[in-house]
Amino acid sequence: MSREEKEEEDDIVCLDESFFINDDYQITDFTFGSHVLQLYCLQSSSTDFDLTGQLVWPGAVLMNDYLTQNANMLQGCSVIELGSGVGITGVLCSRFCRGVVMTDHNDEVLKILKKNIKLQESSDDSMCCTELKAEKLEWGSSDQLNCILQEHPEGFDLVLGADIYILQANVPLLFDTVERLLRDRDQKKCKFILAYVSRAKVMDAMVINEAIRHGLQINEVSGTRRIIKNLEGVIFEITTNH
């Protein structure tokens, strides 16, 4: 190695992922119907790192509005949420459900998720009484999903997901996980509720095609298509075909 090359190598600065992490979380109020939720979250996007779950995305607002208007479907149910982020949907569900498991694949996002669970536990709000859990789950990971199902052998009544398909490569893995969860409870009919926000036509088609490819039935919920933060959103209900 020449002296010039050695000097260039010495000038290189290696950054680990902590450089990109913004953990300047603020407690923020969110209102859905008569329910006011308090959660820690970021106020704006901070990084190029895989930390999209630190924010509250439009699909989560779409989902929570829908669940608030149809709270009867949550009464007494057990719920697992995929790609929970800060936990805004899971926290709302805890007002109605008998059990809520929130999941995410990113360790940093899981930290804020657990922080928000502790915030709910310390709340004086009498409506928030259901136990909330946070679990790591990579879509397509049989080992991680098996661990969750071993802790919940009865399975789940509802699978929820809001704005959770950031990369095309993740969509088949998402539906691998969804199919497993739905078929695990097939005799008692589990369903996947997806709050979908359209950002690219190719993704619109891919989500529908992947559901069909996995042998699932996907239906748009009537009356849910709307514009939210300048994007078109819709609620899909996805079930097994038999």
Image: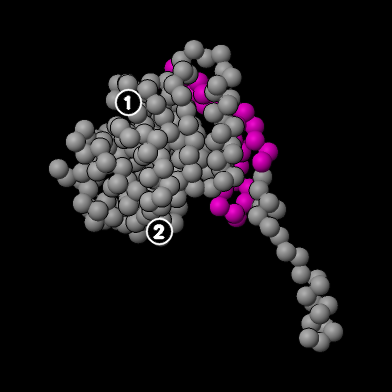
- Establish if 7 lies above or below 195: below
Residue 190: % across, % down: 26, 36
Residue 203: in sight, yes or no?
yes
Is mark 2 in CB contact (under 8 Å) with mark 1?
no
**Local crowd at mark 2 within 10 Å, few (<14), some, or many (≥20)?**
few
Displayed quadrant of residue 146: top left
Q: Which residue is mark 1?
A: 77
Residue 61: in sight, yes or no?
no
**Local crowd at mark 1 within 10 Å, few (<14), some, or many (≥20)?**
some
Q: Secondary structure at mark 1?
A: loop
- Is residue 49 located in the magenta-colored stretch of the structure? yes
At horizontal 53% and vertical 43% (from top left) the residue drawn is 53
Say whether residue 117 is left or right of residue 208.
Answer: right
Question: Which residue range is magenta in the image?
Answer: 23-51
Q: Which residue is mark 2?
A: 168
Residue 26: % across, % down: 64, 32
For the residue pair 152 and 65, the one nearer the viewer reads as 152
